[in-house]
């Protein structure tokens, strides 16, 4: 499976200046490669309703659409896959429920968790937190660039850097081995999400040439 994670976009309703669906539309126009729908407070019905709208937008742009944590919501909207944390359903069970063709990503905080996730069948890893982050209060102590280097050298699946990444440090994360970066507050809190995404992607592409 060929997965590209240049700019991995995660929704955050608390930081966004617009509703999630509108922000996702703006981010897709900018050219994000992956959209993860993360929502902790909506009812299941409301989550599915929103996820279906985001799924439609992603399908039109041929962009991967993942749901955070909720396998039931991912199945209900036929998402491309899910992203799971260490306290969520184990990867093996998620795979059994989702089937062989869906994408499963797992957040890892050290090399041990990375190896376990890889062996369990994860398709990619979210390596987190790289830097101090305010968008996830239980993220733990930042591992820095060494964490990114160590995890990337230990596994043979794509690794996305997450946590406190912005335009001033994203190149360092990519040079440390990340296949892509996730920037939440640095993107969703901007008035012009589309232009921010375009600018970030230009910077990412400059490191690939």
Image (cartoon, grey):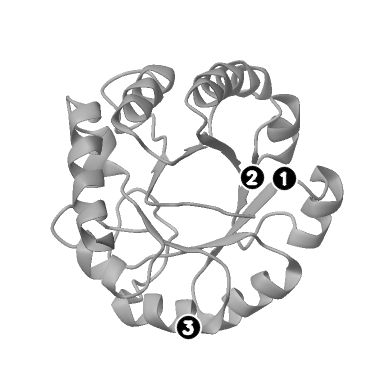
Q: Is residue 46 above or below residue 89?
A: above
* Secondary structure at numbered mark 1: loop
- Does the rendering let one see residue 166? no
* Quadrant location, the N terminus: bottom right
Disc 3 target residue:
153
Where is residue 65 drawn, in percent x and y?
A: 56, 35
* Secondary structure at numbered mark 3: helix
Q: At x 24% / y 27%, what residue is drawn? A: 194
**Looking at the image, which is closer to me, 174 or 146?**
174
Q: At x 64% / y 59%, what residue is drawn? A: 123
Q: Earlier in the sequence, mark 2 or mark 1?
A: 2
Figure quadrant of residue 68: top right
Task: Specify whether 167 is left or right of 130.
Answer: left
* Quadrant location, the C terminus: bottom left
Q: Earlier in the sequence, mark 3 or mark 1?
A: 1
Q: Earlier in the sequence, mark 3 or mark 2?
A: 2
Where is residue 9 drawn, in percent x and y?
A: 40, 41
Task: Specify whether 50 is left or right of 197.
Answer: right
Which is closer to the viewer, label 2 or label 1? Answer: 1
Disc 2 target residue:
82
Q: CA distance from mark 2 to mark 1?
A: 8 Å
Disc 1 target residue:
102
């Amino acid at each position: 499976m060929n997965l590209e994670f240049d700019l991995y976009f995660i929704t955050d309703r608390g930081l966004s200046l617009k509703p999630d669906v509108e922000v996702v539309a703006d981010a897709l126009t900018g050219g994000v490669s992956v959209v993860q729908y993360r929502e902790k407070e909506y009812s299941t019905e409301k989550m599915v309703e929103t996820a279906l709208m985001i799924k439609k937008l992603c399908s039109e742009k041929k962009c991967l659409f993942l749901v955070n944590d909720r396998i039931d919501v991912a199945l209900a909207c036929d998402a491309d896959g899910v992203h799971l944390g260490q306290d969520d359903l184990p990867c093996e069970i998620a795979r059994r429920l989702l089937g062989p063709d869906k994408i499963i990503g797992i957040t890892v905080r050290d090399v041990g968790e990375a190896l376990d996730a890889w062996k369990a069948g994860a398709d990619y890893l979210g390596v987190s937190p790289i830097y101090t982050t305010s968008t996830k209060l239980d993220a733990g102590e930042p591992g820095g660039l060494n964490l990114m280097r160590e995890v990337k050298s230990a596994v043979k699946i794509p690794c996305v850097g997450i946590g406190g990444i912005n335009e001033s440090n994203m190149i360092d994360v990519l040079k440390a081995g990340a296949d892509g970066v996730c920037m939440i507050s640095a993107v969703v809190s901007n008035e012009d999400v589309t232009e921010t995404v375009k600018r970030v992607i230009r910077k990412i592409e400059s490191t690939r040439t």
